Image (cartoon, rainbow, N blue to C red):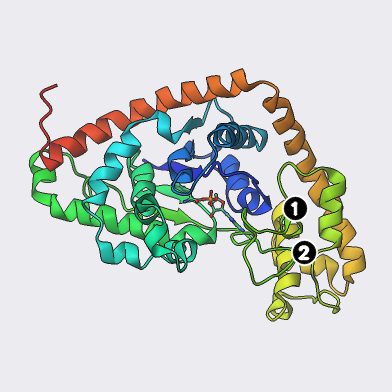
Amino acid sequence: ESRVFSGVQPTGNLHLGNYLGAIKRFAGLQETHNCIYCVVDMHAITVWQDPADLQAAIREVASAYIAAGIDPKSSVIFNQSQVSGHAELAWVFNCVARMGWLNRMTQFKEKAGKNRENVSTGLFVYPNLMAADILLYKATHVPVGEDQKQHLELTRDIAAKFNNDYGERISALGLGDADGYFPLTEPVISGPATRVMSLRDGTKKMSKSDPSDLARINLTDDADTIAKKIRKAKTDTEPLPGEEDGLKERPDAANLVGIYAALAETTAADVLKTHAGAQFSTFKPELADLAVSKLAPIADEMRRLKADPGYIEGVLADGADRADAIARPVLQGVKDIVGFLSTR
Ligand code: TYM
């Protein structure tokens, strides 16, 4: 049986990269899979978050999920900290993962920078919590953007080591299947926008923390702001090529074509076929119109949901109950496997 799990951090400024690389694709997977979508507030506090801002950001991510078309009745939408199994399984994984594995995580290196002595220990073990998120539900497929690939490889390593270290016990208790106790989860990184780049610099990822707001399109930007940011997006002076090969050394142009393709639900090759030879002075306004037509309804729905926090909190409460019901037997199995007493 297949199960999809993914998560987004409530750290403010949800942007087009989060939408095209993740949230939009979450909605698409609902048709064919059982899906669980989490707001990962425990990951968020690995760096300082203002408490009131965090609460607002949790509601905002949940509302973005719904506004983007995730149906809270068929999929599970919930908040990580409201299901205690995430923290419990993460502890076990802290004891499975090796220091050397975590030392190799590029995201930690980037985020910690030269300040290693002074970042939280939570930031270091962040990928173990992410593995716990996924494996608590024995999820088989995890849709994410390109930047999460290494974390998903680590998740597989943790699952494999757990399956191996406790292999005999897992068989003796009759708790394994082909892979062992935990599945070896597949990353789902696909489509034309797995790595949306900054609008100011096509070699840098679009990110929540970019000091320039012009570098990203926020999901809550209004139509004028979206159009302005696309108009000001960095480009070169050549017209668009007819084929993808022609974008190789043109990161800014490639980025805009990829964004267009993802919004239009087609491929970059197809966009180039219809826009071969176009100047940015004509391509950009078309892209802006497309972006506004796709994003404005989402922003409107998010605004509507913001005015109704009771509804969002109800969705999260219901989601937490449903997530917990799936997680509980998985966690109980882990406790039996590692040798914790289950006499109460
Ligand atoms: P986060 O909150 O940084 O980002 C959420 C999702 O958005 C994707 N993304 C992008 N995709 C394309 N282009 C971009 N510029 C871009 N920026 C962000 C991310 O790849 C991600 O899919 N560690 C995760 C959250 C997490 C998680 C999990 C994900 C926690 N537990 C379990 C999957 C499964 C993160 O920080 O994502």
Depth order, front residue of 265/203: 203
Q: Is residue 99 left or right of residue 110?
A: left
Label 2 sits on residue? 271
Q: In which quarter of the image is residue 174?
A: top left
Disc 2 residue type?
Answer: Val
State the image coordinates of residue 228 (x, y, percent, origin top left). 86, 55
Q: In this view, does 331 lie above or below 205?
A: above
Depth order, front residue of 227/241: 227
**How many neighbours does mark 2 have within 10 angstroms: few (below 14), some (14-19), or many (20 or more)?**
many
Q: Residue furthest front?
A: 118
Q: Are marks 1 and 2 in contact (CB under 8 Å)?
A: yes
Depth order, front residue of 125/183: 125
Considering the image in quadrants, where does the C terminus appear? top left
Give the residue at x 68% y 27%: 306
State the image coordinates of residue 309 (x, y, percent, origin top left). 62, 22
Label 1 sits on residue? 264
